[in-house]
Image (cartoon, rainbow, N blue to C red):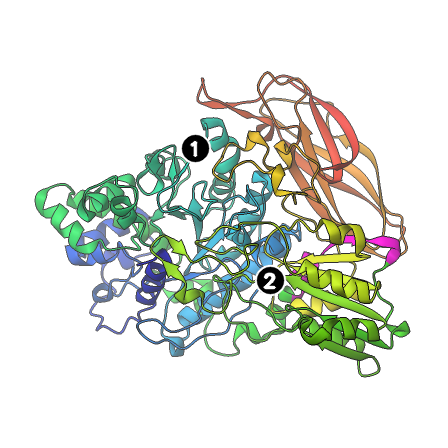
Amino acid sequence: MSGQMWRALALAVSTVCLASPVVAQDTYPFRNPDLATEQRIDNILSLMTIDEKIDILGTQTGVPRLGIPNIGSSEGIHGVVQRGGGKRDLAPITTTQFPQPPGMGETWDPDIVQKAAGVEGYEARYISQTEKYGRQILMLWGPQSDLARDPRWGRSEEVYGEDPFFNGTMATAFVKGLQGQESESAPKYWQSAALLKHFLANSNENGRSWSSSDFDERLFWEYYSVPFRMAFEDGGARAVMASYNSWNGTPMTIHPILNSILTKHWGVEVLSSDGGAVTNLVKWHKTFPNQKDAVVASVKAGINQFLDVYKDEVHAALADGSLTTADVDYAVRRKMRIAIKLGLLDPPEMVPWSKIHDGVEPWNTDASRDVSKQIALESVVLLKNDKGALPLQKQTLKSVAVIGPLADSVHWDWYGGTPPYTVTPLAGIKAALGPDVAVTYAADNTDGKAVAAAKAADVAIVIVGNDPTCGPNMAHDWNDAGTNPCADPGDGREGRDRETLTLAQEELVKAVYAANPKTIMVLISSFPYTINWSQAHIPAILHMTHSSQDEGMALAQVIFGDYNPGGHLVTTWPASMDQLPPMMDYNIRHGRTYMYAKGKPLYPFGYGLSYTTFRYANLKTSAPQINQDGEITVSVDVSNTGKVAGDTVVQLYVGYPNSKVERPAKELEGFKRVHLAVGETKTVTIPLKAAQLAYWNADAKTFTVEAAPVSLMIGESSADIKLTRTLSVR
């Protein structure tokens, strides 16, 4: 059974309603919210049978006999996923659907990401506490906190970008939103719980069931683990899913760091296997001869949520002594801490979130739709705008051709839900233009339709990109080791990496441009493409990712100037695949990301244009030096020198010219998206902690801040540095 099928089965089980007779009495000590958490759990464990304890090691965490509700779970990296079906033949539930995570990242706005996650967490509460839905989904499987180290990775559509600080900032914001945090202080009760995916260094699909991601200790601490650590320490997340792969030869499902670092240092309570990952220890990794040994090793490594066969194996292990009741109790205890944090064992009047149920569905409210619209708008990236080709002036147009296979659809992805509505690019453009402008549509150039439409129009808007599921039958495309090859080798998905970065649909762009030089290209894609021809010839190019229910609205507002695009790229877009190291080379120092790339990219990390221009001046620090355990503030004046209001993203990079160890040429350590009216100047401040300047000292087994000057760089992208300043470290 494929990993995805295991996850579907586990989610179906996790939504079981608490229909069993409840005989619990309010007199049980664990019902007393004034007792210490561990005392309450002690009481729960003393009342549970061994079968109930073992059951809790799946995704069904309730104990009906004791009146303990199920936490439940749902996928949720850019919206709650309740597509229905499964063993219970559940009805689908519509939920607010935001852009794919790279699109959320391209906003460079943690505040809007936190708001989107807040909407998602609220909807999970609403569904869980509204009786007619009959399911519990309070643990949302997200954010995906891996790093897009290679654009060929099939699941790069699930992560925020390639930079560890950037991804960690976005993951932290997403966690806070899910949990319902509305201030600097963490709430007493969570709105919902976040489960991060997939720890660790899980960025190849081909061979993922048995492959090993090999890299040194420094890259673990300075790159691959950073977004997870930030989401745990800064965001307060307490759950994570281990990845299929190994790190340096040890499968992550049983890796010692699950206990030694995640549990003991980062406070993780729920450690989940991925779907079928324990079986993979036997079948693919060949680490154990049988399932029982694999389950025992997983429990001892800290796994306390199985998306796999495990119950009979735990019983057998208890019988032969390879597991003890104490082992099981420790696993259950950690899950019960999450239930208490969600307020599931406390009187409803004590838990603010308990009031969320029935009434108007939240996905049909203006509040949720406003967040959806705003994040869609902020996610649009302007890649090229030669001679002010955009925005188009509606009042001068009589006819527009809208062309392309992505023009009249909003594509869902494997981890997306069912939106309450969608606005396609074609619908958005028609609505923006009104009845007085003729809009023609051609999906492709069959029988010359696209060329004819382009020739007859004042302007052609060609909308191309990838198919996130490689066709409509992804659910049936799984094989024993992943998914079948995509028909287009430039496409990728879970279970399948991309074979090329070439955009096959660029041929359609060329044909349209030949018919009408007034062509606007819209690239809706989950990952980078080497669109060198388009960059050289097409007057204007926009980019956004899939799956936003307001996709067409956002594009139309940008195209016609009702919104000035301010999104920026979150990965390096190479000019050629020749610039990439081999796929399985996890040592990023060999030429990966903007930090170590060796060739000139097509588009650099952090890149994005605007309809206006900005000036940067007066780079200052709150102190001339920073102590090795201190913090300063970096400030810069930013002015809008153009003719329209707009957003810029102030990016703070740090370089280490005098370091005694190998360091990146520059690395992002702060950023802020800021809106400026025409002629307006704002002083933008960005905090910088000395701890952010540290490298991992493998000999001392600790982070070390060098007493050497560092270079502070302010830019509009990683390749467009506007101001520099030296900062002393002592």
Q: Is residue 387 magenta?
A: yes
Instruction: Name the foreground residue: 288 vs 223.
Output: 288
Instruction: Please state which of residues 405 and 302 is positioned toward the viewer in this rendering.
Output: 405
Quadrant in which the N terminus appears:
bottom left
Does 199 lie within the magenta span? no
Q: Is residue 385 left or right of residue 46?
A: right
Determine whether 604 is above or below 663 in the image: below
- Tell me: residue 148, above or below residue 492: above
Foreground residue among 183 and 571: 571
Query: Quadrant location of the C terminus?
Result: top right
Helix, strand or loop at label 1? It is loop
Residue, far bottom: 435
* Residue at image coords 39%, 79%: 132
Tell which circle, 1 or 2, labels the residue nearer the N-terminal end: 1
Q: Disc 1 to disc 2, how far (Cα)?
A: 32 Å
Relative to 609, residue 354 above or below: below
Q: Within the image, what quadrant is residue 714 found in?
A: top right
Q: Is residue 381 visible?
A: yes
Contact flag, marks 1 and 2 (Cβ < 8 Å): no
Per the image, the residue denoted by label 1 is 214
Q: Say whether residue 562 is visible.
A: no
Q: Magenta span: helix, strand or loop, mainly?
A: helix
Q: Which x, y percent locates residue 10?
A: 32, 61
Q: Position of residue 570 (x, y in %)?
A: 64, 47
377 and 366: which is toward the camera: 377
Which disc is residue 546 wearing?
A: 2
Answer left or right for 180 relative to 99: left
Q: Amino acid at mark 1?
A: Asp
The span picked out in magenta is 373-388
Dot 2: what SS?
Answer: loop
